[in-house]
Image: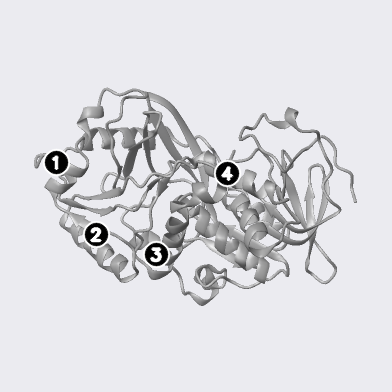
Amino acid sequence: MTKFSGFSILKHAFTGHKNWTAQWPESQPKDEYDVVIVGAGGHGLGAAYYLAKEHGITNVAVVDKGWIGGGNTGRNTTIIRSNYLYDESARLFDHAVDLWQGLSQELNYNVMYSNRGVLMLAHTVHDIQSFKRHIHANRLNGVDNQWLTTEECKAFCPPLNTSPTARYPVLGGALQKRAGTARHDAVAWGYARAAASRGVDIIQNCAVTTIRRNSNGSVAGVETEKGFIKAKKVVVSAAGHTSGIMQTAGINLPLESYPLQAFVSEPIKPIFPCVVMSNAVHAYISQSDKGELVIGSGTDQYTSYSQRGGLPLIEHTVAAISEVFPTFNRMRMLRKWGGIVDVTPDRSAIVSKTPVQGLYVNCGWGTGGFKATPGAAHTLAWTVAKDEPHPINAPFSMERFRTGRLIDEAAAAAVAH
């Protein structure tokens, strides 16, 4: 086994900050792991936790090129909802929402989940028809969703501009009260600490370069910048980097990567009680516990691995929010950021075994990754432990792109997020 040098490994403890390494001595990884998970975001760390807790598999390493929660997990806008149209999506995301409800108690770590509700605005007759279709489909799947009139939208979210002369008049909205927000990076920290306490090793600042295979084609382990880690099973869950890593194992994925931008305003006193999303202007807004208005939009129109994105899209988003919420026109932007989202042809995730024995992949979440975190992690752990799909993630296999049984949620959803 190639000796490692100069990397950091977390074992049985965690502080929740990228500069924690001085508090623990460096150590060497084990000679072999039952499972190596590439990507220390919410999905990867969550899968490690559920492998240990529910399946008794504790000989697990989570490896990341950066620090815990330093990728897309820490670069989202915290929205959680399950009001998707298609049965497959509704089941998966509602499973996640169910787990979100008690996640702080489960992990003994405050992920700051808030059931403040997500209100999706209707601005046209088509919007009304589409949302009411969503509501009926959701109720058939046991997912809460309800229609609000214009007056009820205003009562639920007072800053909303409901003037009939507005450029985008509010004709009503669909409200999922059980939806809400959570603290993005706290989710990663909570899963990391809980997984580490059960014996999982978390290796930071150690980029995986290649998935090595045995002579019979099965997984042998992963090559990293610091050396080789032997493993019986390998899981790739690294948004923005999955395609390149999987290609080293001979797997080509139908993914494209796009920048996804968001920003926050200067902090103000509590004024915004919920999450509001608008498809017509393609913008969404909520208020963080620190008082910042959290604002974001859709993906950029070009493929890129940039974590900055383009200025025109942010300008469009600012204009849209100012039109729907004129009271915020004089607010100043505090900071802006971008993430990298992988999207599939049908804009739905892949949570699946691969043709390579012992290799699994979790990717293609697009803008839905954060809200799915506990559900994706839970079903991924099942798939890895049992070497078979969980009933909830079974439709999200790679095979659907060969058979054509797609889950085209992008064409059905009211808004991407």
Of the residues shown, which amino acid type is indicated by label 2?
A: Phe
Q: How far, Cα to Cα, is label 1 from label 3?
A: 30 Å
At which x and y percent is residue 301? 42, 46
Q: Residue furthest left?
A: 164
The residue sitting at 49% across, 37% down in the picture is 338
Q: Is the C-beta separation of discs 3 and 4 under 8 Å?
A: no
**Mark 2 neighbour density, 10 Å: few (under 14) some (14–19) many (20 or more):** many
Of the residues shown, which amino acid type is indicated by label 4?
A: Gly
Question: Which residue does the numbered mark 1 point to in the structure image?
Answer: 162
Of the residues shown, which amino acid type is indicated by label 3?
A: Ala
Question: Which residue does the numbered mark 2 point to in the structure image?
Answer: 131
Q: How far, Cα to Cα, is label 4 from label 1?
A: 40 Å
Secondary element at tag 1? loop
At which x and y percent is residue 113? 43, 44
The residue sitting at 18% across, 46% down in the picture is 153
At which x and y percent is residue 408? 41, 65
The residue sitting at 38% across, 53% down in the picture is 81
Question: Which residue does the numbered mark 3 point to in the structure image?
Answer: 90
The first of marks 1 and 3 along the sequence is 3
Query: Viewer-nearest of labels 1 and 3?
Result: 3
Q: Is the C-beta separation of discs 2 and 3 under 8 Å?
A: no
The first of marks 3 and 4 along the sequence is 3
In this picture, residue 33 sits left or right of residue 324: right
Question: Which residue does the numbered mark 4 point to in the structure image?
Answer: 190
Secondary element at tag 3? helix
Query: Viewer-nearest of labels 2 and 3?
Result: 3
At which x and y percent is residue 4? 85, 42
